[in-house]
């Protein structure tokens, strides 16, 4: 056993015994669970320059969190003097509750988020009116998400382009079953809900009328699909890959098929933490950027999969993560193999430039979609409100500072907060200079 593996095993052992002990004492498990720090010692010289030496971040064990985990395990944060403590969140609602508490209250300072959660937590729209201002600092990953469909709907031949693959299927299903087709996500009115709605609506299926949408916690994904809780599930890998690998269902669409190099999940932190610790925020971003660059390299994918698959982190079979990180999918009801890394998770490079930089044009899109579906009445009722919230919450100056301090080449440092026009698989265009035209062009909306 290598030294690193034995350290991992030791930590895993310590974790499970502490959980057992907590159970024996009859205490409720702590809200954030155990936080894991880097096995690599802090660079004390770098740490002495910072305004704080540590931050508590939440994560959900899907590919989007890989840069945070790799940043901790490979010592990228420690190198810049910051002890990043990661704690696994049982659900997205737990992450929200923990960020409202903040680390001073036993919660977290920030972490991995589906958009527009940080924007809506900032506005109080997800927190019973309690406003907890947050800042979006970087994109964690693009692509790597998908819509899985159950084997019971193999005859629907569901694909990313439902108009072509499955005309009339949903109406037929609803008539035959005497109930609506059920499609699930892990948290309502956020990213995964937005993907499934985009996908259905682009196929001429009205998500409000033709299907039933429901929230299912990620750990219940496999069992839920086996039990028939839902016919489709929109989530991050490794779940869609596990569903197809375990033959519980099939991968109907990857989000990369819907929108190449699309915005996915983000790093966001409480504003009060960032305002108090601007140097540590830059150190956090430097570590994150280096972790993303490392993760993006083909030669590191197997090591990344080994780290993530361990009990300490995701506790998911290694081959599932190896395939998911390399973009090796089996797509459609016949499981047609697809092995294009450009269609898999992207952490740094893409045909549209750097993934990590928090383009305001991309974070705005989630608010425009919120407007499309009237997710947050009273908070996001028009484009002007969406833009004002976006300007308050998305912050790129710290990212640019981190990029400069790392000495990144000019080609990797965006010169505009807009990535320009975006084109979806169905030909829809989102021009961030005219979001209203995008909204007007969409046929199905609230
Ligand atoms: Ca996701």
Image (tube, helix red, strand yellow):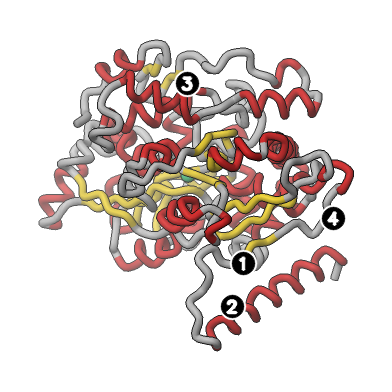
Question: Ligand 1 within 8 A of label 2's CB?
Answer: no
The quarter of the picture where residue 93 lies is bottom left
Q: Are discs 4 and 1 less than 8 Å apart at CB?
A: no
Residue with the most extreme bottom position: 24
- Please determine whether, in this image, residue 122 is positioned above or below residue 397: below
Looking at the image, is mark 4 or mark 2 earlier in the sequence? 2
What is the secondary structure assignment of the residue under circle 3?
helix
Question: Ligand 1 within 8 A of label 1's CB?
Answer: no
Viewer can see residue 302: no
* Residue depth check, mark 4 versus mark 3: number of the one nearer the observer: 4
Looking at the image, is mark 3 or mark 2 earlier in the sequence? 2
What's the mark number on residue 34?
1
Residue at 63% across, 39% down: 276
Q: CA distance from mark 4 to mark 3?
A: 38 Å
Q: Which residue is mark 2?
A: 19
Q: Are discs 1 and 2 less than 8 Å apart at CB?
A: yes
Q: CA distance from mark 1 to mark 2?
A: 9 Å
Looking at the image, is mark 1 or mark 3 earlier in the sequence? 1
Looking at the image, is mark 4 or mark 1 earlier in the sequence? 1
- Please determine whether, in this image, residue 56 is positioned above or below residue 11: above
Residue at 59% across, 48% down: 65
Q: In screen coordinates, is 166 left or right of 20? A: left
Question: Ligand 1 within 8 A of label 3's CB?
Answer: no
Q: Which residue is mark 3?
A: 361
- Please determine whether, in this image, residue 338 is positioned above or below residue 98: above
The quarter of the picture where residue 165 lies is top left
On the image, the x and y values in percent for residue 110 come to 55, 47
Front residue (pair 341, 365):
365
Front residue (pair 80, 158):
80
What's the mark number on residue 41?
4
Q: Are discs 3 and 2 less than 8 Å apart at CB?
A: no
What is the secondary structure assignment of the residue under circle 2?
helix
């Amino acid at each position: 056993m290598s030294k690193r593996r034995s350290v991992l095993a030791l930590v895993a052992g310590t974790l499970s015994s502490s959980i057992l002990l907590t159970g024996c004492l009859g205490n409720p498990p702590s809200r954030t669970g155990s936080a894991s720090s880097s096995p690599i010692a802090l660079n004390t010289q770098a740490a002495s320059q910072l305004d704080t030496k540590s931050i508590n971040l939440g994560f959900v064990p899907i590919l989007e969190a890989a840069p945070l985990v790799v940043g901790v395990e490979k010592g990228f944060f420690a190198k810049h003097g910051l002890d990043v403590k990661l704690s696994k969140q049982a659900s997205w609602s737990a992450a929200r509750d923990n960020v409202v508490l903040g680390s001073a209250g036993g919660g977290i300072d920030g972490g991995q988020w589906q958009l527009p959660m940080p924007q809506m937590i900032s506005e109080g729209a997800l927190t019973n009116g309690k406003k907890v201002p947050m800042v979006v600092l970087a994109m964690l990953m693009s692509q790597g998400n998908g819509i899985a469909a159950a084997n019971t709907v193999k005859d629907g031949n569901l694909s990313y382009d439902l108009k072509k693959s499955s005309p009339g299927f949903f109406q037929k299903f609803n008539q035959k079953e005497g109930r609506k087709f059920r499609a699930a996500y892990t948290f309502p009115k956020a990213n995964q809900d937005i993907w499934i709605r985009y996908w259905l609506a682009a196929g001429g299926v009205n998500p409000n009328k033709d299907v039933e949408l429901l929230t299912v916690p990620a750990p219940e994904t496999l069992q839920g699909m086996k039990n028939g809780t839902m016919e489709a599930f929109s989530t991050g890998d490794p779940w869609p890959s596990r569903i197809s690998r375990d033959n519980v269902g099939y991968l109907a669409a990857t989000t990369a098929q819907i929108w190449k190099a699309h915005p996915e999940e983000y790093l966001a932190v409480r504003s009060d933490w960032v305002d108090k610790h601007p140097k540590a925020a830059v150190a956090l971003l430097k570590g994150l950027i280096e972790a993303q660059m490392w993760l993006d390299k083909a030669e590191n994918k197997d090591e990344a999969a080994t780290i993530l698959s361990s009990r300490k982190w995701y506790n998911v079979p290694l081959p599932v993560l190896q395939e998911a990180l390399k973009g090796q999918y089996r797509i459609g009801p016949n499981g047609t193999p697809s092995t294009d890394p450009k269609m898999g998770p992207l952490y740094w490079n893409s045909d549209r430039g750097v993934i990590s930089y928090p383009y305001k044009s991309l974070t705005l899109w989630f608010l425009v979609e919120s407007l499309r579906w009237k997710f947050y009445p009273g908070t996001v009722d028009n484009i002007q409100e969406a833009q004002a919230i976006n300007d308050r919450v998305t912050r790129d100056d710290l990212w640019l500072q981190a990029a400069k301090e790392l000495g990144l080449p000019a080609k990797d440092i965006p010169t505009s907060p807009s990535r320009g026009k975006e084109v979806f698989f169905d030909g829809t265009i989102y021009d961030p200079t005219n979001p209203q035209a995008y909204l007007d062009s969409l046929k199905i909306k609230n």
